[in-house]
Image (tube, grey):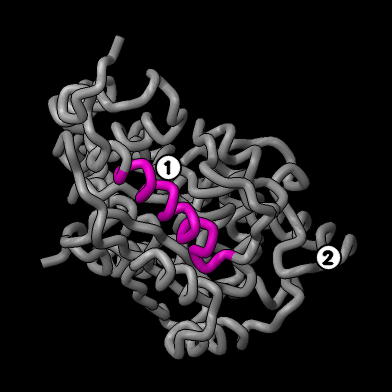
């Protein structure tokens, strides 16, 4: 049986998602305070490990089964010349992921992550949102459900990534719909468009908002009207991870725009997530500030694919290894002063 059958029932699911295990969180904090190091000496690794422990429900957790999910979708707005690459590249890159040839394949393998790739109706792009909603409710719900079902219940950390020519424009439209400002605040160069291309993307984003006023300030309607199947799938996966108490590392601008739709629908729904990195894509830094997410890394990456989030797996692994593997002062026979 599907977990939800409409956007309204998906909202009900969001409203019922669990909160952090306070007992485990407190236990991890107490253990951290007794480890053989000066208080706070590991900086953000300490708070990251305690956060992870709270969501996993154990004061001394292990991190052994990270999962990286890539969702791919095609966008009707590519007809508006918003990308430097043709829509056919989406499918070509999916084949590259499946063959193990992309950056995210190497990064996932480097950090022991299971990588799963899901193309979503690539032969059926979403509608051009300058002419109406990108998706019907049925299509949007189906993509949310696919993302929900793609999460491995045995995973202990999730990274969600995407591939979809045109989706930086979609993400910019979502940010404008949910957070306001001007189109230029959110539009960047994406796959490498020139200055005239950025102006064109701004025009497309503004036209999309004008055509879909129901998207303003409404996360789920914004996702339907301005998003894409791969963005909806990421949102579904992030929600499912919360239900299963699996911490999530958010990737770049596009992933965070999808996550922002969930945050608008329930303010604390992203408490089980951290921002993996600060992308070089235009509006990502502003989006993270509005989402109140401080990135773990800033490496100038703007590839998508979940690549920045995959690199951040190593940071979370390091944090958990220290919390759970280090000796306490008592265990080591060291005086704590």
The image quarter containing residue 64 is bottom left
Q: Alpha-carbon neighbours of circle 2 within 10 Å: few (<14), some, or many (≥20)?
A: some
Q: Are marks 1 and 2 in contact (CB under 8 Å)?
A: no
Quarter of the image that includes the C terminus = top left
SS class, disc 2: helix
Name above or below for residue 21 compared with residue 89. above
The image quarter containing residue 272 is top left
Q: Which residue is mark 1?
A: 274
Q: In 3D space, how far apart are the residues under numbered discs 1 and 2 (Cα atoms)?
A: 32 Å
The part of the chain drawn in magenta is 304-321
Does residue 311 show up magenta in the picture? yes
SS class, disc 1: strand
The image quarter containing residue 47 is top left
Q: Which residue is mark 2?
A: 197
Residue 283 picture location, percent across and down: 68, 46
Query: Of marks 1 and 2, which one's residue comes earlier in the chain?
Result: 2
């Amino acid at each position: 049986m599907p977990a939800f059958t409409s956007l309204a029932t998906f909202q009900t699911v969001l409203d019922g998602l669990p909160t952090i295990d306070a007992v485990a969180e407190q236990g991890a904090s107490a253990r951290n305070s007794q480890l053989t190091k000066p208080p706070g000496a590991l900086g953000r690794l300490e708070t990251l490990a305690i956060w992870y422990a709270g969501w996993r429900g154990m004061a001394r957790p292990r991190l052994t089964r990270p999962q990286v999910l890539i969702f791919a979708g095609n966008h009707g707005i590519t007809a508006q010349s918003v990308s430097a690459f043709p829509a056919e590249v989406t499918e070509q890159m999916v084949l590259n992921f499946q063959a193990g040839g992309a950056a995210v394949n190497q990064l996932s393998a480097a950090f022991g992550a299971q990588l799963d790739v899901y193309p979503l109706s690539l032969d059926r792009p979403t509608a051009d949102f300058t002419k109406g909603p990108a998706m019907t409710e049925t299509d949007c719900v189906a993509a949310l459900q696919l993302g929900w079902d793609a999460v491995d219940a045995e995973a202990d950390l999730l990274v969600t990534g995407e591939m979809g020519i045109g989706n930086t424009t979609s993400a910019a439209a979502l940010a404008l719909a949910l957070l306001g400002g001007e189109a230029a605040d959110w539009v960047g160069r994406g796959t490498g468009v020139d200055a005239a291309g950025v102006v064109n993307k701004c025009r497309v984003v503004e036209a999309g908002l004008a055509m879909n006023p129901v998207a303003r300030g409404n996360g789920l309607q914004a996702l339907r009207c301005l998003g894409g199947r791969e963005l909806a799938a990421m949102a579904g996966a992030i929600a499912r991870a919360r239900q299963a108490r699996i911490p999530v590392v958010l990737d770049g601008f596009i992933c965070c725009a999808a996550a922002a739709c969930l945050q608008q629908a329930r303010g604390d729904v992203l408490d089980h997530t951290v921002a993996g990195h600060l992308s070089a894509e235009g509006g990502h830094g502003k989006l993270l500030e509005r989402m109140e997410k401080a990135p773990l890394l800033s490496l100038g990456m703007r590839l998508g694919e979940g690549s920045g989030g995959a690199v951040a797996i190593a940071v979370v692994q390091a944090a958990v290894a220290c919390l759970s593997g280090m000796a306490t002062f008592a265990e080591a026979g060291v005086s704590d002063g």
